[in-house]
Image (cartoon, helix red, strand yellow):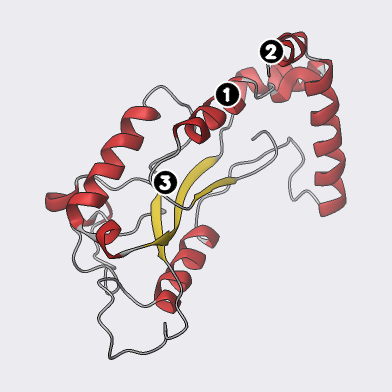
């Protein structure tokens, strides 16, 4: 979580409570970016700790999952589960757009959903089960075509705001990998992490 812009949590059903707890635990054990040096510590206090965007991606969804009341139930659950989290859950990676918030309606794909019916959107996205005849447009699926949804998913992930992970602007892939190694080393040396690891089964 310390070295990424977007954390994509993929599930095949709604919902695995142990998976939610796993994300919450990982956030709790997330090391401070300032742990590696004193210089970074003063900078992190001035600029503030950055947290990744959390995208909750449901895979292999069926027709019932796409019903507006099902989408609302999922969103209400996740909003409650992550109410104390610092992960960014409202960053525009939505199944449908909040036209009240951004002023434009981009829902040529997800027309059945609205803020009035499903509530304020969160970073939740649903991808359907793929069948052998998934490209047959004569069969009613109850959701947009997989290709359209996949295209929208790619578009929203690539379009999300990126926070600065390090104090180095335009970090290279090699520099990012070096930063990942330093972060992992600081995690392994963290006394809190070692103490927590003792209680794991």
Q: Is residue 134 left or right of residue 107?
A: right
- Does label 2 or label 1 sit earlier along the sequence? 1
Q: Position of residue 69 (x, y in %)?
A: 18, 51
Mark 1, residues whose alpha carbon is within 10 Å: few (<14), some, or many (≥20)?
Answer: few
Percent position of residue 61, x then y: 38, 61
* Label 1 element class: helix
Say whether residue 48 is visible. no
Above or below: residue 97 compared with residue 199: below
- Residue under pointer 1: 25
The residue that mark 3 highlights is 91
Q: Are marks 2 and 1 in contact (CB under 8 Å)?
A: yes
Residue for badge 2: 196
Say which element carries label 3. Answer: loop
Q: Are marks 3 and 2 in contact (CB under 8 Å)?
A: no
For the N terminus, give its image quadrant: top right
Q: Is residue 117 shown left or right of residue 148?
A: left
Viewer-proximal residue among 151 and 193: 193
Residue 166 position, x and y percent, is 73, 36
Q: 73 and 89: which one is in front?
A: 73
Name the residue located 40 percent from the left edge and 56 percent from the top edge: 125
Indicate whether 1 appears above or below 101. above
Cα distance between the residues tagged 3 and 2: 31 Å
Residue 109 visible in the displayed image: yes
Label 2 and label 1: CA atoms lie apart by 10 Å
**Nearest to viewer (mark 1 / mark 3):** 1
Q: Considering only vertical position in the picture, is 104 above or below 73?
A: below
């Amino acid at each position: 979580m310390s070295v990424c812009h977007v954390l994509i949590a993929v599930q095949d059903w709604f919902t695995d409570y142990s998976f939610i707890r796993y994300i919450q635990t990982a956030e709790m054990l997330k090391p401070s970016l300032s742990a590696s040096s004193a210089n970074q510590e003063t900078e992190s206090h001035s600029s503030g700790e950055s947290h990744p965007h959390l995208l909750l991606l449901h895979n292999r969804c069926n027709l019932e999952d796409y019903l507006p009341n099902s989408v609302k139930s999922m969103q209400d659950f996740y909003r409650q589960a992550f109410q104390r989290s610092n992960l960014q859950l409202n960053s525009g990676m939505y199944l449908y757009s909040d036209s009240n918030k951004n002023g434009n309606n981009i829902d040529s794909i997800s027309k059945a959903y609205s803020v009035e019916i499903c509530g304020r959107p969160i970073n939740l996205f649903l991808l359907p089960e793929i069948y052998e005849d998934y490209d047959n447009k004569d069969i009613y699926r109850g959701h947009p075509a997989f290709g359209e949804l996949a295209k929208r998913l790619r578009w929203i992930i690539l379009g999300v705001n990126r926070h600065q992970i390090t104090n180095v602007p335009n970090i290279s892939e090699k520099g990012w990998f070096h930063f990942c190694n330093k972060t992992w080393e600081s995690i392994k040396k963290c006394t809190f992490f070692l103490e927590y690891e003792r209680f794991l089964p």
